[in-house]
Every structure is written in structure tokens, then in C-alpha cells.
Amino acid sequence: MRVSLLFIPLLLLHIPIVSHAAAIHDAAMEGDVAAITAALDAGADVDESDGSATPLYLAVFMGHIQAAKLLMERGADVNAQTALGSPLMAAMGIDKIDLLNLLLDGGADPNADGSSQPALHAAVNLGCLDCVKALVEAGADVNARAEDGKTPLHMAKRGGQREVADYLMSHGVVLPTPAPISMKLASANVEKGRTYFTRVCGPCHNAEPTGGNKIGPNLWSVVGRDKATMADMRYSDALLSWEGVWTYEDLNKLLLEPMATTPGVYMEMPGVSDETERVDLIAYLRTLSDKPNPLP
């Protein structure tokens, strides 16, 4: 009984906070400006979380611009992080551009992250060109990577969003360019390249002269072969538009960071950032031929 009596004051102290929070969150979901005002006047915390989101996040998510304006006027943090991300992440979509601009004008970080990707990636993923423009004009990094390594340009090209891709290209996209490696191939460690291929590339690519394709094309005789020409393979527009044969430097470029150096490719992998490993791998790929191409 003593334990229960001691617990009652703590419970009573907690009830008003829960009550205000519930009221303001319900009001934000409904866009009820009067109810939001009443809850705030009664002492509700404008940035109180209901366990998942703040009132501002909920108002933005539901598309209630007047409710969002009121919450911001009453001091809501436009960059408050919640389990669902910042309010900016809830403002993505063609029908929410006014809300997106409201948040950006109110100081929202254009580089805010969601659960696994920046806001710009979310805008590209939704195909919202106006959202992309608003974020970039506010300072979003057009070269940012999501957790999986994807860039906004890669996502736009992979999704066939030509206008978005063109806009990004004209607003600061930088395609990484590795230093030339051809002259380093003669001193490369082919066995290390073979080991790397077996461990990393082998699950998706065959390397036998009589083998077929796997998820990716067979890489036997890849050095010196015309790009995107293996039968029964579906190639990305990024590779189909890249003319010529696979040279050592073309492989160097692709393998550095496929989604950044060759945006739109189907080979969505981090790449081989270490130059020595990349040189060893390309030297091994050269050996996959009855008549390997000459070294430079």
C-alpha cells in the first residue's frame, strides 16, 4: 500500500504533461488551429514528442499549412529530430511544396537526414522536381551520398527522371575521376586481384570462357570488348550510351565508385576505392582472355 501511495504523486505530476501532449498531437494531426492554441496556452510543450513525432512533424505530414505556421510562430523547432525524421522529411511531395518552402524559409536544414537518406534523395525518389529545386536553392548538397552510397543524380538517372537529372547536373554535380592507372598494371599483383574478384565480384559475375551470365555479364574477355554487348543482358542507359570498348581507364573509372562515376548504372555497389586493389583487380580482369590485351 505504501508503494502505491508514494506512486500516486508521481502519477499525478505526469498526467498533465501526457494530457497536453496528446491534445496538441491530435490537434496537429487534424489541423485544428484553435485546439493547438488552447493546448499551448495550457502549457503543452510545442516540441513534445508522442513517441514518434512532434506536433510540427504531424501537421506537415498531414498537409496542414496553417497549423504548421502557428506551431512555428509559437517556437516549434523546424529541425527537431524524431523517430520519423525531421519535419522537412514530411514535407516531400508535389502537393506539399508550400509546406517545404515554409520550413526552409523558417530555417530548416536542407541537408536534413531521414532514416537512411538526405532530404534531397527523398525528393528525387518521389520525382518532385519542384522539391529538388527548393532544396538545392536552399543549399542542399547535390553530391551527398545516402547510407547505401547512392547520389541524387544516380537515383534520378536510374529512375528515368531526365529533368531532375539535367537540373542536378547544372547545379554543381561533380563526377569523381580517378587518377590514370594504366602504367601501374605491369607491377600489379594479379593473384591479389583474383582473390578480390572471387570474394567480391564472383557472386555476380562469371569469369569462365564457356560460362554464362549471372546477375551481371560474364567478364571473360571484358578488356577490349565493346561495352554493353553481352547477349541476354539488360543494360542501363548509362552503359548503353557509353560508347567504345572497355579500356583499362574505363574500367578504372567504373570500378572506383559506379553510382557516382557512372550514375544510373545497375551495378549499385560501393566500388573499389583503394587504388592498389583496383589496379590488382583490373590486372586480373586482363588475364581473362585467350589473348590478353597488351599492357601500356
Image: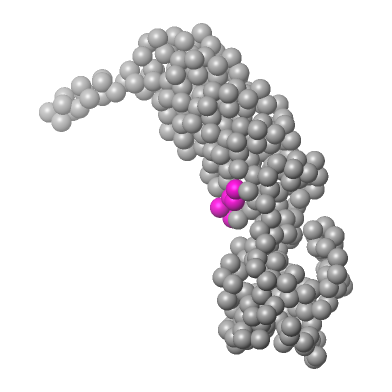
User: Which sits in the foreground, 106 or 268?
Assistant: 106
Boundaries of the magenta span: 144-148
Q: Looking at the image, can residue 232 be seen?
A: no
Q: Residue 131: give x, y in percent of width and height.
A: 68, 33
Query: How many tags in the picture?
Result: 0
Name above or below for residue 152 compared with residue 42: below
Q: Residue 236: give x, y in percent of width and height.
A: 80, 59
Magenta segment's dominant SS is loop
Residue at 69% x, 36% y is 132
Residue at 49% x, 23% y is 55
Q: Residue 1: give x, y in percent of width and height.
A: 14, 28
Question: Where, by quadrant of the figure, is residue 140 drawn?
Answer: top right
Q: Looking at the image, can residue 49 be seen?
A: yes
- Quadrant for the C terminus in the image: bottom right
Residue at 63% x, 25% y is 101
Question: Where, by quadrant of the figure, is residue 222 drawn?
Answer: bottom right
Residue 152 located left or right of residue 114:
right
Q: Residue 122: give x, y in percent of width and height.
A: 64, 41
- Residue 132 within the segment the image draws in magenta: no
Tell me which colouring the rendered structure shows.
one colour
Residue at 64% x, 53% y is 150
